[in-house]
Image (cartoon, grey):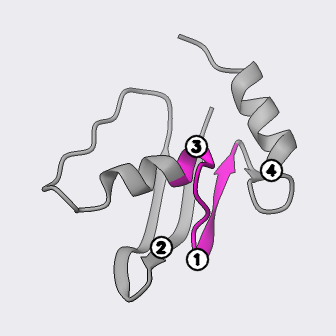
Amino acid sequence: MKVVLKNITKRYDDKLVLNNISYVFDHGVYGLLGANGAGKSTLLNTICGSILPNSGEVLFDNLSTKSSPSECYKFRISTSKF
């Protein structure tokens, strides 16, 4: 499964937390390192759909969380392999 982040931006009031983040996660194990308040939890919550970005989108195997969120998350959960 491929997870694609396209131009993710998230603001909390006047604080810019994620600024135009784009990345492609292919198969593998990834880690996020950063100082407190760097946006690690915000990024993960955005990928999981717990919070919505102010702009940009998350795609799971080319399914957009914007256009079909329930289908996207059903697909993601049903195809997860551990």
Q: Nearer the viewer, residue 54 or 23?
A: 54
Distance from the alpha carbon under mark 3 to that under mark 4: 11 Å
Q: Quadrant of residue 74?
A: top right
Say which residue label 1 marks: 54
**Mark 4 — residue?**
69
Identify the residue position indicated by label 2 in the image: 10
Q: Earlier in the sequence, mark 2 or mark 1?
A: 2
Mark 4 and mark 1 lie on one chain; the one further toward the N terminus is 1
Q: Position of residue 46 (x, y in %)?
A: 53, 54
Q: Are marks 2 and 1 in contact (CB under 8 Å)?
A: yes
Measure how far apart labels 4 and 1 are at the Cα level.
16 Å
Q: Report if the CB atoms under discs 4 and 1 are less than 8 Å apart.
A: no
Task: Give, as a three-letter code, the residue at label 4.
Answer: Pro
- Distance in Å between CA atoms under marks 2 and 1: 5 Å
Range of magenta residues: 46-60
Q: Is residue 45 above or below residue 30?
A: below
Residue furthest to the top in view is 82
Give whichever of 33, 62 is nearer the camera.
Answer: 33
